[in-house]
Amino acid sequence: TRLRNEEVGKTLLARTRGYGKLILFGEHFVVYKVPALVGAVSMYTDCDVEFVETPGVEVIDDRPAVPNYKVKKKEEADHAIDLVLKHFNMDTEKQGLKLHFGGDLTCVSGIGASAAQVVSLSRALSLALPKAMTEDEINAAGYEGEKGYHGTPSGIDNTAATFGGVLKFQRTDGDPIFTKKKITTPIRIVYASTGMTSSTTEVVGDVKAKKEADPAWFDDLLQKYLVLVEKGEKAIDEGDMVTLGALLNENHTLCQSLTVSCKELDDLVTAAREAGAIGAKMSGTGRGGLMLALTPTEEVQDTVAAALEKLAPQVWKTTFA
Ligand code: MEV
């Protein structure tokens, strides 16, 4: 029956989810093969693949997004989709495709929307072809797509999009190393958008140029970061939110030194702290995009969200548990 088919369709669609993410520690440093900590949010992108007679690829993009995001990222997104299709050896001149992206993840710089999209596409292709794939293979296919967005992706975004949860992640010369963290105390987060869409390729490229111009400057920041991330992992393991908050603040200072923060992010970070957050930092690429705040209780989470809503175009709450 039609109803039954709809149910089956929904179940299949649910299996194509790629999650958004928030970096707790280590944006930019993670590109240089040091550990970072990331939490996947519960919001996701999903993808429906339809084989059609007309050759080529038709993309229907129904993902919610902040104004301008999809326009600015269109070329990169198309390139990313092409890379994933190539990875699957799809000849779309012989077999036309209609791709329909949806889900509840709002596309905004910093949330890993590109990774969520390519991971959901990889999952949808694996189901539609069908081609049996392990989770590591899905992740690897997503990584191929991520190269469409930025030249040297660390792989942290696609790994969070594939596996979910809170992960310790490290890029290596070979396959990445990552472990899922056991969360002993809920990590209550408020995150807010500056409304500004930034280019990961550009910002990562700029950090690289600065590093090459002054290796000692970068190394000093990297050494400070290494101490931080180790303490951050310990604070998560011990459920010590006060220490975790202080360390998030320190990570924000390092991002400022790296020149990847900006006034809009700094202002939101300050406002969150003033409203009762026990720590706050920018998260992701920076120079626009997102910031996050750690709140000790649900009540403070609501207060901080209300304070940020006065200043930021979009504010969300999430809890890693
Ligand atoms: C982007 O979410 C995180 C960056 O560190 C880039 C990357 O890891 O590929 C800025």
Image (spheres, helix red, strand yellow):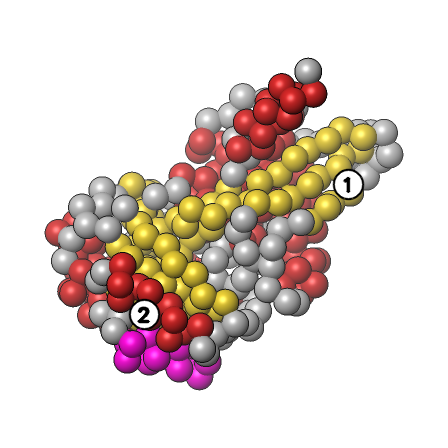
Relative to 156, residue 179 above or below: above
Read off the residue under disc 2. Answer: 303
Q: Which residues are magenta?
A: 262-275
Mark 2 secondary-structure assignment: helix
Q: Is residue 160 toward the left or the right of residue 81 in the image?
A: left
Q: Is residue 129 visible?
A: yes
Which of the 4 image quarters holds residue 47? top right
Where on the image, by quarter, is ligand 1? Answer: bottom left
Question: In the image, what residue type sits under mark 1?
Answer: Val
What residue is shown at x 65% (from left), y 57% (from top)? 76
Q: Is residue 145 toward the left or the right of residue 82 in the image?
A: left
Q: Position of residue 190 (x, y in %)?
A: 36, 63
Crowdedness near tag 2: few (<14), some (14–19) or many (≥20) residues, C-alpha within 10 Å: some
Residue 174 shown in magenta: no
Read off the residue under disc 1. Answer: 57
Q: Is residue 143 toward the left or the right of residue 294 in the image?
A: right
